[in-house]
Amino acid sequence: MKNILKLSLLSIILAFASCKDNKTESIDKENTEVGAESQLYSCPMHPEVYGKQGEACSVCGMELTEPFTPAATAPEEVKKEAEPLSKSSFSIDGILSNYLKLKNGLAKDDSKEAANAAKELNTTFNNLKSDKIEAEFKKEYADLADDAKAHAAQIADNSGKIDSQRAHFALLSKDVNELIKIFGTDIKIYRDYCPMYDQGKSGYWISETKDIKNPYYGSEMLTCGGITNEW
C-alpha cells in the first residue's frame, strides 16, 4: 500500500513538473513571437523613417531592412569646412552659379536645361582671368579648370542622354568641390551625398539649399541623400 502511495505521489510530482515546463516553454515562445512582431525596422538611407520590416520608406521608397534603435535616428553631424587655402581676391562664384543651374536641371530631369547650363559654365571658365591667383595655386587651378571644362563639354554635347550627363556631372562635381576648398565662395552652399549612385563611389554634389534635390535620380528618388558639409 505504501508503495502504491509513493508511486502515486511521484506521478503527481512528475506531472506537475511537466506541466510547469510546458507552460514556461509556451510563455517563452509567446514572448519570442511578440518580440519579433514588435521589432521595428528603419530605412538604410533615412534612419528616421521606421516601421514593419519590408515596408517602403516614405521618403525614397526603399525597403525598411535595418533593425530600428532610437540611436539610429540621431542626425549625423554636418562638417563645417575650413577657411579657403587661397587668400587672393580671385572668385569662383560665377563658376558656382552656372554649376548650380546645371545641377538643378538634372534634378528636374531636364537634359536640355543641363546642357545649356554646361555651355554657360564653359563660357564662364574661358572668360575668367587667373592673374590674381597666387603662384602656388595657378597650376592646380589650370588642371581643375581644364578637367571641369572637359566634363561640362560632354554634358553640353549630350542633350537627351541624361545618364551620360549625370556620369560627367559626378566628375565635374569633384572638380568644383576642389575649387571651393582652394578659393572659397561668398555663396552659402552645402555638399550633399547619395550613397545609392554609382555604388556610393561618386554620388556627391554641391547645392545652394538644405533641401535635398538629387541630380542623379531626379524625380525617381528626388529627396534621396543627405548633407555632409557646409560652407
Image (cartoon, rainbow, N blue to C red):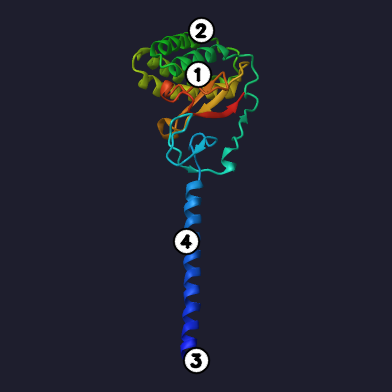
Viewer-nearest of labels 3 and 4? 3
Above-or-below relation of 202 to 176: below
Q: Nearer the viewer, residue 49 or 35?
A: 35
Residue 37 appears at what percent x and percent y?
Answer: 48, 47
Which amino acid lies under the numbered mark 2 shown in the image of this protein?
Asn
Residue 46 appears at what percent x and percent y?
Answer: 51, 34
What is the C-alpha distance between the residues marked 3 and 4?
36 Å
Label 1 with label 4: CB-CB less than 8 Å: no
Q: Label 1 belongs to which residue?
A: 142
Residue 51 appears at what percent x and percent y?
Answer: 49, 38
Q: Secondary structure at mark 3?
A: helix
Q: Residue at x 39, y 11 (%)?
A: 112
Which amino acid lies under the numbered mark 3 shown in the image of this protein?
Lys
Q: Nearer the viewer, residue 93 or 85?
A: 93
- Circle number at residue 31: none
Viewer-nearest of labels 1 and 3? 3
Q: Label 2 belongs to which residue?
A: 127
Can residue 140 be seen from the camera position used here? no
Which amino acid lies under the numbered mark 1 shown in the image of this protein?
Ala
Q: Earlier in the sequence, mark 2 or mark 1?
A: 2
Q: Earlier in the sequence, mark 3 or mark 2?
A: 3
Q: Label 3 belongs to which residue?
A: 2
Q: Secondary structure at mark 1?
A: helix
Which amino acid lies under the numbered mark 4 shown in the image of this protein?
Ser
Q: Residue at x 64, y 17 (%)?
A: 88
Q: Nearer the viewer, residue 2 or 26?
A: 2
* Number of other residues with Cα within 10 Å of mark 2, as a class: few under 14, some 14 to 19, many 20 or more: few
Viewer-nearest of labels 4 and 2? 4
What is the C-alpha distance between the residues marked 2 and 1?
13 Å
Q: Label 4 belongs to which residue?
A: 26
